[in-house]
Amino acid sequence: MKFQKRTWSSLFIIALLLLLSACSGSDEGSTGKENNGDSDEASTQKITIFQSKVEISDQLEALAKEYTTETGVEVEVWGTTGDDYFEQLQIRLNSDQGPSIFSLQNVTEAEKMKSYVADLSSEEYAKDIAPGMELKVDDQIVGVPYGVEGFGLVYNKDLVKPEDVADYKSFVSTLEKLKAEDITGLGLSKEAYFLIGHISNYPFSLQSDHYEFIDNLTSGDVTMAKTKEFQEFGKFMEAIKANTPSPLDVTYDKEVGDFAAGKSAMIHQGNWAYGMLADFDVDFEVGMLPFPLNGTDKLAVGVGNNWAVNGKKDEAETKAAKDFLNWMFTSETGHRYIVEEFGFVPALTTIEANDLDPLSQDVLNASNSGQTIPWAQNYYPANIVPNDFAPKAEEFFLSKDMTGEEFIENLDDAWKNAVK
């Protein structure tokens, strides 16, 4: 029923937007710029924002009011249900009803919106974006991160030292030692992204060019089974299966709860898990370490959403939109909203973030220093994690005999199924 309600809701929104498009007239298309008001003077007095992160909607509207009070420029924030945001965005842009500022999740969406996104490379704050975190198309910065997030080995500092999990050999030795002490060495959980989605990112992200590798994987020019990073990843997964309880009976809540209770020494999670850990009031120090595939010492840090400017608006509105982002990223008020009101780990090195929780602080340190590997998962085929990877991972953990090598071969089959 929930799905049906969402479907009908989406259809209604699409119909409404098409109606708006039909009523908007068609005489502005010849110049490639949108007609946004009676004059350039009017357009400079107002900008519009459409973005997908529903949970910051109220705070963004409050920020917009502060900007209007300070500058006199009206900022209107459009609402969204979140689920079909990108579909709504495409319809609005294609019907010349697009916003001045909008959000994009990743390079795949940016490529689709390539004709609309403005070049932000020369903006004042662009040089301050943490290394590798900017959204680029054709070497131009077209998106500025909302913030950064990271995942890795969330560990109990009383039970594990960084040198205990620095490479494959020490990682396996630590799992075996903890198992003998009746402690779970590494906890996973059965939800698709916590079972295989995030952890599968590592062998992709360690490729010299993960975009090219994924394209070649899709075209059949390479396989995971014959790529050394995946071969070692299969060994890691084999060691996890042999030395820890099955994750198929573990929910996210239990995974985090067992860690908080000291039953697990490590869990594979992100900095978002600290909220639940705080609720448990843990009495030990926690931190986040890299998953040591190929001995890497870098955290997987990425961006969930990016701010982009509509370059097809008239020059005055485009400038007004850029001015708003510049104010948000350089003013004290903007910084306060990003850290305290939105709750983001800042993606700009010039934004101070005091009193971060320890997991977010580890992510921020890695991001600002460039000690990161990318979220290659953002370039996966749509829905491959829940529909194709997760069933193969469940099969792997259910089977006592399936080797890591066979598991990687199954992931190759899953990829072929996802892209056929």
Image: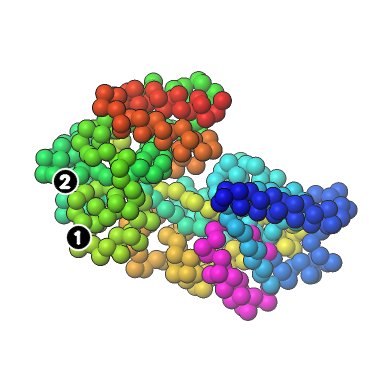
Inspect the image, locate mark 1, and give the three-letter code of the amino acid beneath it: Phe
Callout 1: few (<14), some (14-19), or many (20+) C-alpha neighbours within 10 Å? few
Q: Residue furthest bottom?
A: 69
Q: How is the image coloured?
A: rainbow
Query: What is the number of the mark on residue 284?
Result: 1
What's drawn in magenta, residue-wise? 48-73
What SS does tag 1 mark?
loop
The image quadrant where one finds the C terminus is top right
Residue 50 colored magenta? yes
Of circles 2 and 1, the one toward us is 2
Q: In front here: 241 or 56?
A: 241
Residue 247 occupies which quadrant of the picture? top left
The amino acid at mark 2 is Ile
Residue annotated with mark 2: 183
Q: At 72% from the left edge and 69% from the top edge, which residue is drawn?
A: 46
Whether residue 75 appears in magenta in the rendering, the answer is: no
Tag shown at residue 360: none
Contact between labelled residues 1 and 2, with CB atoms less than 8 Å apart: no
In the image, is residue 364 above or below residue 113? below
Looking at the rendered structure, the secondary structure element under dot 2 is loop
Between 252 and 343, the one lying in front of the other is: 252
* Residue 271 shown left or right of residue 175 in the figure: right
Please say if 104 is above or below 168.
below
Q: Is residue 104 left or right of residue 365?
A: right
